[in-house]
Image (cartoon, helix red, strand yellow):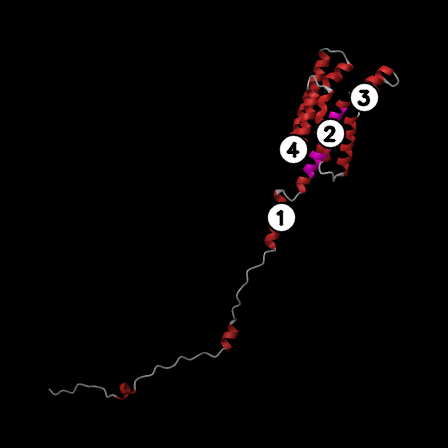
Amino acid sequence: MLRGVLLRLAPAGTASDLLWVALVLVVAVAGFALSARLDRLDEQVAVVAAVGMVAFLISPVSWVHHLFWGVVVVGALLGDGRDRRRLLVAVAGAAMLWMRLPWWGVDLLASHRAPQWAGRVLQSGYTVFAVLALIALWWLVARAGAGGAQIGAGTPSAAAAANTASSAQTAAPARRTVPSDSHLSNARPISAPAAETSSNASQAPANTDTGSS
């Protein structure tokens, strides 16, 4: 689609070809970097949307019906519908897809009722949509998602903090109380019973050997 925009602005030639190659490289590098970042954030619908927009822009021959990838862009921007900014941008993108911008541009150029640049912009309206879609995916999904991941509960630092807090709240083991020495000293000692001796053994005379020589 970028190729078509350049051909409508200037005739084909070496300068136009070099400019197209430069634009293709810029869009491809930026778009695939964006898709890789979205993949790390597990935004799979946005990954498909970004790659679709890159393919639509850098292809040498892109038709207007190839912009069916724009439906994926609307879904990726819409998300769960709770973010108002993403909701408004998704609605605006759907409106751009609904309008017949290229045909309006051609009619405006043929009627000469407006400046030529306005007709060219409308004629390239779907290219404008694709570029704006990549910017919106980066700003509202990739950038916002990366900021949320840094402070989210799923990050390693947050998990470590949660583990530390749970460890601090764990109850300490119960300790046995040992009586102090003062309590032991006041206690009356228990005397062991004396061993009883046999009365017969105590009264028996000692047996001495008095044999005569």
Q: Which residue is mark 2?
A: 135
Task: Tell me the kind of residue under disc 2.
Answer: Ile
Residue 93 coordinates in the image, percent (x, y): 76, 29
- Up/down of 196 relative to 137, above or below: below
What's the residue at 66%, 40% (across, down)?
150
Which of the two discs, 1 and 3, labels the residue nearer the N terminus?
A: 3
Residue 101 coordinates in the image, percent (x, y): 80, 22
Residue 64, numbered circle: none
Region rendered in magenta: 128-147
Q: Secondary structure at mark 3?
A: helix
Task: Tell me the kind of residue under disc 4.
Answer: Gln
Q: Which residue is mark 1?
A: 161
Q: Secondary structure at mark 1?
A: helix
Which of the two discs, 4 and 2, labels the residue nearer the N terminus?
A: 4
Alpha carbon separation for disc pair 4 and 2: 17 Å
* For discs 1 and 2, the disc positioned in front in the rendered view: 2
Q: Which residue is mark 4?
A: 44
* For discs 3 and 2, the disc positioned in front in the rendered view: 3
Give the position of the C terminus as an image quadrant. Answer: bottom left
Residue 122, numbered circle: 3
